[in-house]
């Protein structure tokens, strides 16, 4: 059950922001598609880079490579698994991406910012080895770690920037590197047909291991690695070229050697990687992969080198589900998980009380004697409403000496978080009271402790 749940989450990616109309404004967030020949917004010639920002703010760029629609994912899934006749089909025009990463104001990659789409990877696995293979959706975490480690080689050393004088002005060596990168990107795009062969070069250390044993994988990580190698490998400088007589030409002896330091990102480089990765995973045509999108956000200068929190492409709970799956397999689960995953037949539905039919039970359970002694600090003239207090009392009453699950449902803005804060305050006060009852030792500064209301 948990494995199925995790599979559903993998095929349910987070969306990427849509391009905004009228973005030529002084907005704090700007989103637009970036063509291969466009000037990037981190280039000093672009109007975004030239824009005057508030004091202490700089630009940070989230780059989304390989845009595809969720409707394309749905088409692929239904072509393999068929369509459920009872399903409710709702049109979804949301878009996501194969990968994403963060660039700083100068166009350099932020460390650990790359993110690989679990959905694109899973679609690739759907194609090969296919859903009939044991453990066919295992190994994404290792795959993504290899992917991130490979791209992290494009992160420049701190605090200096390669090819920079320290004030943002590129030196001659830096310009040589940028020209080299453009050439590398063009070569990489033209050799995209060979990308599928990258998987063969995966070493044993990078192999993925599933519950059922080793599986074939590592395509995305290997592709990122070979691509980065292409970018960082310097081309021969003119000074290395010999004449027909084997003598270096006089006018080439002073030519500057290109640097192998990580370069600034370029649109051509990103598009080339989209082509290479899409073909390696075999999803370019399946998902109609196309395009690069950039989100420009103003951030505080002190956090400019940190990865953006906007690069989420995957479900927030996939890793947690993997941990739960391992725990369930090992029999190491608590009452909460066991209750949540219990079979319907084992649920004592007959003991349920419909409070709409029996409002007297509500009145009884919100009596002053049932209200916990702890409450979240707030104005005393703003108590919880009846339904909130009812939930708090029930939770504290049912789980005072037991474990389990208590579900509270309600639309946004109905006070679920406010209710939960009172539960937390009640737990803190109860634990304090229990500790005093057992005469447990307290810190020396207990006389300075303020009461919890």
Image (tube, rainbow, N blue to C red):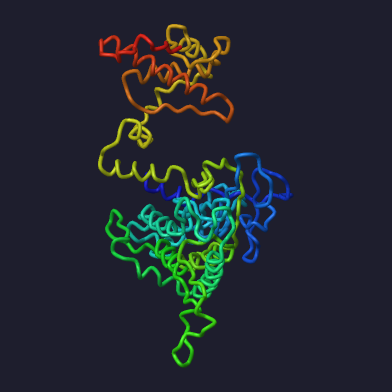
Q: Residue at x 64, y 45 (%)?
A: 29
Q: Residue at x 47, y 53 (%)?
A: 115
- The residue positioned farthest toward the top in the image shown: 369
Q: Which quadrant of the rendered structure holds the N terminus?
A: top left
Residue 355, placed above or below residue 206: above
Percent x, y of residue 340: 38, 34
Percent x, y of residue 250: 52, 84
Residue 285 visible in the displayed image: no
Relative to residue 322, is residue 38 drawn left or right? right
Percent x, y of residue 355: 50, 19
Q: Residue at x 42, y 11 (%)?
A: 450
Residue 333, placed above or below residue 21: above
Residue 46, placed above or below residue 435: below
Residue 59, placed above or below residue 267: above
Q: In which quarter of the image is residue 407?
A: top left
In the rendered picture of this protein, how many numbered marks are placed on residues?
0
Relative to residue 375, is residue 337 drawn left or right? left
Residue 85 visible in the displayed image: yes
Front-most of residues 171 and 95: 171
Percent x, y of residue 328: 30, 41
Front-most of residues 265 and 317: 265
Q: Residue at x 48, y 27 (%)?
A: 408
Relative to residue 433, is residue 10 drawn left or right? right
Front-most of residues 391 and 103: 103
Relative to residue 18, is residue 159 drawn left or right? left
């Amino acid at each position: 059950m948990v494995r199925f749940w995790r599979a559903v989450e993998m095929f349910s990616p987070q969306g990427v922001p849509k391009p905004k109309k009228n973005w030529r404004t002084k907005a704090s967030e700007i989103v637009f598609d970036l063509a291969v020949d466009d000037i990037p917004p981190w280039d000093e010639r672009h109007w975004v880079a030239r824009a005057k920002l508030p004091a202490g703010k700089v630009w940070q760029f989230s780059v989304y490579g390989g845009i595809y629609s969720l409707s394309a994912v749905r088409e692929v899934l239904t072509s393999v698994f068929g369509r459920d006749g009872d399903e409710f089909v709702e049109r979804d025009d949301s878009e996501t991406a194969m990968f994403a990463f963060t660039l700083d104001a100068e166009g350099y990659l932020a460390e650990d910012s790359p993110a690989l789409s679990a959905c694109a990877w899973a679609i690739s696995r759907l194609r090969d080895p296919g859903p009939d293979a044991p453990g066919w959706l295992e190994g994404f975490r290792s795959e993504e770690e290899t992917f991130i480690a490979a791209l992290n080689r494009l992160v420049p050393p701190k605090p200096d920037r390669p090819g920079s004088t320290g004030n943002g002005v590129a030196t001659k060596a830096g310009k040589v590197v940028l020209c080299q990168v453009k050439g590398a990107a063009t070569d990489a795009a033209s050799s995209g047909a060979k990308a599928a062969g990258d998987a063969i070069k995966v070493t044993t250390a990078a192999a993925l291991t599933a519950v059922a044993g080793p599986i074939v994988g590592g395509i995305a990580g290997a592709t990122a690695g070979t691509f980065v190698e292409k970018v960082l490998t310097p081309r021969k400088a003119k000074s290395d070229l010999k004449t027909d007589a084997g003598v270096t030409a006089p006018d080439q002896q002073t030519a500057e050697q290109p640097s192998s330091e990580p370069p600034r990102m370029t649109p051509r480089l990103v598009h080339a990687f989209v082509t290479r990765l899409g073909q390696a995973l075999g999803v370019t045509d399946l998902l109609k992969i196309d395009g690069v999108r950039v989100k420009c956000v103003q951030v505080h200068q002190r956090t400019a080198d940190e990865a953006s929190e906007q690069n989420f492409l995957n479900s927030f709970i996939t890793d947690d589900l993997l941990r739960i799956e391992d725990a369930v397999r090992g029999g190491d689960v608590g009452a909460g998980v066991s209750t949540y995953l219990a079979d319907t037949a084992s649920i004592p539905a007959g003991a349920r009380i419909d409070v709409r039919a029996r409002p007297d039970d509500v009145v009884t359970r919100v009596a002053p004697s049932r209200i916990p002694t702890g409450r979240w600090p707030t104005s005393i003239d703003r108590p919880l409403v009846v339904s909130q207090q009812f939930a708090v009392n029930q939770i504290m009453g049912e789980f005072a000496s037991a474990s389990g699950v208590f579900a509270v449902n309600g639309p946004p803005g109905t006070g679920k978080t406010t209710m939960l804060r009172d539960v937390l305050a009640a737990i803190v006060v109860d634990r304090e009271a229990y500790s005093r009852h057992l005469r447990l030792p307290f810190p020396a500064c207990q006389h300075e402790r303020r009461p919890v209301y």
